[in-house]
């Protein structure tokens, strides 16, 4: 599937991008569906980037028409188990206007499966966001457990399940109207 690179671009995050990502991450509509739902300060955001992400994980920003509109990242990469967790957030202003979530999730998952020797990707969906949980399941993610303490569902996507569903996923992406 070809996506116009003048419109969409996924780039590795640079320090200069962090302020834009920070502002999106702190949007109330984004925070309410995150594991950490609290508003964070920029100092903590920089600490997270410098100490948790920068050296060992993948952290990308999404650009739409040359404007940063979101981010996606991997954490807990385990090369022996060929496993990592992933997360994504997209500015609600942009996503609600253009329904870009599906396209950006597709691009990111394709990138991670092609860059890393990954067999399994895990993600969490906050309780109350059942629409996203159902969307993930329709793309091949399997529900594995519910975390009562943090109130989120754990889902896992096997690379072979992703590959099996790829034609259907591409068809869904092509049908989106921007």
Image: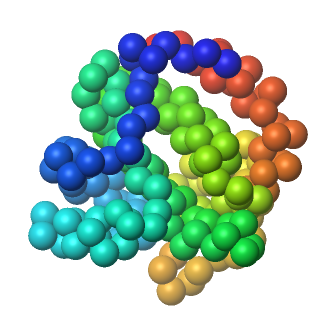
Snapshot quadrant of residue 65: top left
Residue 129: x %, y % from top left? 52, 55
Residue 76: x %, y % from top left? 54, 73
Q: Residue at x 71, y 58 (%)?
A: 118
Snapshot quadrant of residue 117: bottom right
Q: Is residue 68 above or below residue 50?
A: above
Q: Seen in the image, is 174 located left or right of residue 49?
A: right
Front-lying residue, 129 or 63? 63
- Spot the residue most to the front: 55
| Colour setting | rainbow
Q: Is residue 143 above or below residue 69?
A: below
Front-lying residue, 1 or 26? 1
Q: Residue at x 46, y 56 (%)?
A: 58
Q: Residue at x 34, y 30 (%)?
A: 63
Residue 164: x %, y % from top left? 87, 40
Q: Residue at x 41, y 28 (%)?
A: 9
Q: How many labels sit on residues?
A: 0
Residue 8: x %, y % from top left? 42, 23
Can see residue 29?
Answer: no
Can see residue 35?
Answer: yes
Q: Seen in the image, is 130 located left or right of residue 98?
A: right
Snapshot quadrant of residue 123: bottom right
Q: Seen in the image, is 155 located left or right of residue 64?
A: right
- The quarter of the image holding the N terminus is top right
Q: Is residue 68 above or below residue 80?
A: above
């Amino acid at each position: 599937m070809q996506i116009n690179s003048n419109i969409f671009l996924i780039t590795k995050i640079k320090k200069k991008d962090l302020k834009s990502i920070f502002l999106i991450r702190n949007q109330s509509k984004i925070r309410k569906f995150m594991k950490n739902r609290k508003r964070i300060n920029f100092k903590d955001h920089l600490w997270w980037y410098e100490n948790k992400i920068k050296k060992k994980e993948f952290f990308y920003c999404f650009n739409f028409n040359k404007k940063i509109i979101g981010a996606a990242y991997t954490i807990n990469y385990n090369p022996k188990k060929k496993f990592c967790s992933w997360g994504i957030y997209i500015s609600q202003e942009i996503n609600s206007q253009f329904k870009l979530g599906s396209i950006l999730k597709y691009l990111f998952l394709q990138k991670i499966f092609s860059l890393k020797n990954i067999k399994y990707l895990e993600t969490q969906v906050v309780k109350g966001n059942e629409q996203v949980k159902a969307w993930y399941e329709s793309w091949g993610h399997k529900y594995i457990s519910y975390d009562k303490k943090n109130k989120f569902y754990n889902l896992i996507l096997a690379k072979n399940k992703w590959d099996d569903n790829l034609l259907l996923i591409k068809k869904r992406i092509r049908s989106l109207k921007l």
